[in-house]
Amino acid sequence: MLTAFRWLIRIVTGLTVLGLVAALLAYYILSRSLIDYDEDFTLAGISAPVEVVRNNDSVPHIFGQTDEDVFFALGFAHAQDRLWQMTMLRRTAQGRLSELFGPATVKVDELMRRYDLYGLALQSVAAQDPATRRALEAYAAGVNAWIGEVNKGARGRGAPEFFLFEPEISAWAPADSIAILKLMALQLSGALQSEVLRARVSLLLSADRLADILPDDPGQGVAALPDYASLVPGVQPSFAPVDFALGPLSPVADPGMAGASNAWAAMPGRSAAGGSLLANDPHLGLTAPTIWYLARLELQSGGVIGGTIPGTPLVLVGRSEALGWGLTTAYVDDQDVVIEALNPENPEEYRTPDGWARFESRQSIIKVKGADPVTLTLRWSHNGPILPGGHYDLGSITPAGHVAAISWTALSGADTSISGAMALMKARSIPEAMEAGRKVIAPAQNVMLADGSGIAMQVMGAIPARDPDHPSKGRLPALGSNPAVGFKGILPYEENPSFRDPASGLLGNTNNKTVDRPFPNHVSFDWGDTQRIQRWLALMKAREVHTRESFIEAQLDTVNPTARALLPLIGADLWFTGEAAPEGTPERLRQRALILLAEWNGEMNEHLPEPLIAEAWLRALQKRLILDELGAMAESFTHISPVFIERVYRNVGGASVWCDVIQSAAVESCTDIARIALDDALVELTERYGPNLESWRWGDAHQAVHDHPVLGDVPFIKYFVNIRQSTSGGDDTLMRGVTRGEGKEPYQNVHSAGYRGVYDFADPDSSVFITATGQSGHPLSRHYDDLGELWRRGEYIPMSLDPDLARAAAAGVMVLKPAT
């Protein structure tokens, strides 16, 4: 017995030692790709030494003698810190994910090939102005210089992920940067998804009820549309949920997550210090690392600092000495679904207003790891690429004998958007910046501007021109054989909405409606916000003059205007009625919840239970209201629609009929449904968090999910690469944290401000910024998540263009020397 015990001790000890040795060996191998920020390099491709000064937060400050040398160094720094992320963005745009991930990503690759984003990016290189082409070429040379160092220097393959997947890295090219910008346009556009959803729901509901569940922005008058069945005969209604999923690594967002952001500015007269102010926080899906990378560039036009996206040579959001600029999604209606009728005698032809025409066709082969290659036949009509029914759920709205073509402004082979962004970055005044937008095609953005004397907001991006007789006004798919259907060019840039130095001294946008122009000169029928703008207006009106601190306060505001408006409305007949119910009963639990909500100010604080109760109640309420009318289709409405609930409880246009459950004999009132929904919510939360309401925390449910896009679901590894944080805010707060809305964790924060910046032109070097994770994409680096805790707490880091300050606070200085 003693001998067996001794052998057991030896085995356990041996296994432990082997485990430690394996862990140390793995750490040594993986740490080879960590960056030494004091290492110097001698490289071909630069004309003179370039200094890369990194501060304690690993933000590179790049000083070179020419712009091309600076862009070279930016490409080098991006590749050092984010090489895996860059190659994944490029592979996604190219439709080459399946070479690494096998059949799971074939559907994503198929969509990218059919859009041909990368082919259009290749064509667009020649369309750029000379300065932008030089910048793209220099940036690509910098990326390739680091790839060369990785290949010759045993630097851990450049990133740990390359040990698990194909280690070969193709050379970077100018088209790669343009393709990433086009990929962003895809991520930020939800017009196609909105058309499909509206078409599906219109087959199930009357026009009045459709206006309830998919409401127009309040105050905007829209003429009644024909129902989809009359536009495209032969489509059968279905209660099945709308399915936009493409599988892992999909860049296609659900309509509610297709882009959002905040930006506001104040003129010097509304600033306490006498200088213009600008705040911006773009909202995108959360990842680890974040998509944003902070950098400071010293260009011939002056210094610029702010947020870049690895893979592109641009400071997309930030400031120079003379100008600050921020972005919000403009919600331009830039996509149309066109239903093309096939020739029964020849399926390679489709009906046009002038008769039958032949599709443009070519083949494309997707290489699939571990499986046979997939050969696609890519077809385009004059309206755009043909997508199969399995994408965007198009099959559910396409009748037999027809196919769906997609018109989209981003499908241009002469896309000069990156030249426009480059000109914006170098602009020295508001007029220069507004003129730079003339070159931008996609993604369409509201660009908030501030210089030393004024402020402006300009919509930059192509807005499609449509025929005034378009049968659906672009809101529903329509038959391509109708001569009024399809894009009729692009509206002149002068017609893009523009605002300059308003009398109020303030400009702001939270993806809210910006103009109310009639079709076809409209910007959009669907906007991204009806709630946050009201809270912003209240905060701005509360002060005569503003400061950097008041702008930060607004950026971090977590008061939920939806809860403050809706809870008194839906619970009007529930509060303070009857005597206290016995402890332990559902009635008593409901009363306790109502007491908490009655004293709540609407602040979505992570430490409070009230936000969790309110969100669960409103979710359960909306589900109760729509389930019997829409059946399983109700699953497609994953987020609360405040306008819908308000219409129902104010009985706008008879909308209170949603409260009656059709299948039951009794006639339920809206009070009945509110009470039942609250009970539903409390049962759900009690099962998850226990019976003590006062101990519930919104932050436990509303965790920010910064997951690694590839390794985030891999057992054991996920604990090293994913970043989870308890957060405040919610779907409708200015400090926005959009909930997942579905699955086992519906309240997780999955879409938020990955970058925040506030710029004060009275004292430019007091400007501040932050990103959601850290600068490095290497999980073993201390810079992988070091900014994340500051971001979670609502803190910032300084943002200076002073070279002496950068050098004085240097944590590492890298010098790139030209090879002779």
Image (tube, rainbow, N blue to C red):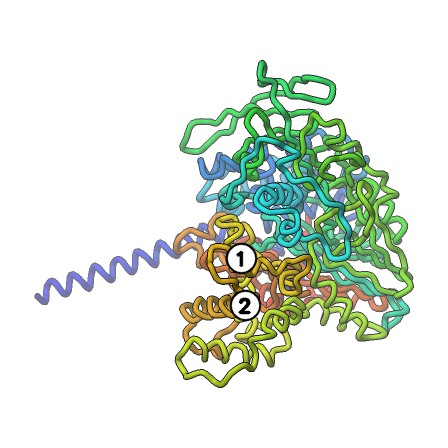
- Residue at label 1? 741
Front tag of 1 and 2: 2
**Crowd rating for badge 1 (residues with CA inside 10 Å; few <14, some 14–19, many 20+):** many
Q: Is residue 527 above or below residue 150?
A: below
- Residue at label 2? 674
**The residue under label 2 is which amino acid type?**
Ala
The label on residue 70 is: none
**The residue under label 1 is which amino acid type?**
Gly
**How far apart, in angstroms, are the residues tagged by discs 1 and 2?**
20 Å
The quadrant of the rendering that contains the N terminus is: bottom left
Q: Which residue is depicted at the point 87% across and 52% down?
A: 428
Q: Position of residue 261 (x, y in %)?
A: 70, 57
Please indicate, yes or no, whether residue 20 appears anywhere in the rendered image: yes
Q: Looking at the image, which residue sits at the far top?
A: 345
Q: Nearer the viewer, residue 110 or 19?
A: 110
Q: Position of residue 155 (x, y in %)?
A: 52, 46
Q: Position of residue 152 (x, y in %)?
A: 54, 40
Question: For numbered disc 2, what is the local secondary structure?
Answer: helix
Q: Which residue is depicted at the point 76% across and 63% down?
A: 279
The number of callouts visible is: 2
Question: For numbered disc 1, what is the local secondary structure?
Answer: loop
Please indicate, yes or no, whether residue 95 appears anywhere in the rendered image: no
Quadrant for residue 290, please give it.
bottom right
Q: Position of residue 366 (x, y in %)?
A: 51, 29
